[in-house]
Amino acid sequence: YVLNWYLGDLMPNLDAVMKLPLDALVLEQGRKGYTIDPVEIRKRVGPHFCLFGFGYENDFCEDRREALSNELQRQIEGAGRAGAFIVGTPIMPPDAKPEAVDFYFSEARRLGKYA
């Protein structure tokens, strides 16, 4: 399988990326003033390829479980129902709380079960 881990502002280049022979697009949270939103990307690409989502670094560092859960649910509902979706993580910072990471994956298993 061909996975593209796209770093940087994807949105201006999304149409060109969609023409690549990809199986999956790995997304990373926006930085430096741009936004990366798996839900918005899914709306544009449809089921064209699998998307990898992410949690926000600060939520892992500050153990913000409600924020982690809410973002997971939003991404799964918005990007995962109309195409393949894999819950991913950011590049984990050294001050991420292990208990927040454990919660995130437990919550991903719970929320990712389709009825």
Image: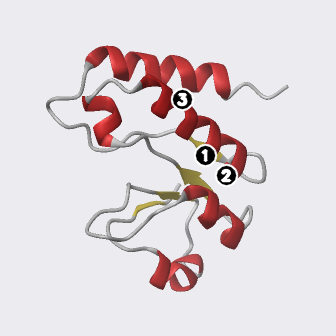
| Vertical placement of residue 23 versus 108, above or below | below
Amino acid carrying mark 2 in the image: Ala
Q: In this view, does 97 lie to the left or right of 70?
A: left
10 Å neighbourhood of mark 3: few (<14), some, or many (≥20)?
some
Residue lying at 52% horizontally and 85% vertically, measured from the top left: 16
Q: Where is residue 9 in the image (x, y as percent from the top left)?
A: 37, 74
Amino acid carrying mark 3 in the image: Ser
* Residue underneath mark 2: 79
**Residue furthest right as drawn:** 115
**Residue furthest left as drawn:** 94
Q: Distance between the residues labelled 3 and 1?
A: 10 Å
Q: Position of residue 34 (x, y in %)?
A: 37, 71
Q: Distance between the residues labelled 2 and 3?
A: 15 Å
Q: Where is residue 67 in the image (x, y as percent from the top left)?
A: 47, 33
The answer to whether marks 1 and 2 mark residues whose Cβ atoms lie closer than 8 Å is: yes
- Comparing marks 3 and 1, which lies closer to the viewer? 3
* Residue underneath mark 3: 69
The answer to whether marks 3 and 1 mark residues whose Cβ atoms lie closer than 8 Å is: no
Q: Earlier in the sequence, mark 2 or mark 3?
A: 3
Secondary element at tag 3: helix
Looking at the rendered image, the quarter that the C terminus falls into is: top right
Q: In this view, does 31 lie to the left or right of 47?
A: left
Residue lying at 35% horizontally and 34% vertically, measured from the top left: 59
Secondary element at tag 2: helix
Q: Earlier in the sequence, mark 3 or mark 1?
A: 3
Query: What number is the disc on residue 75?
Result: 1
Residue lying at 73% horizontally and 53% vertically, measured from the top left: 83
Amino acid carrying mark 1 in the image: Gln
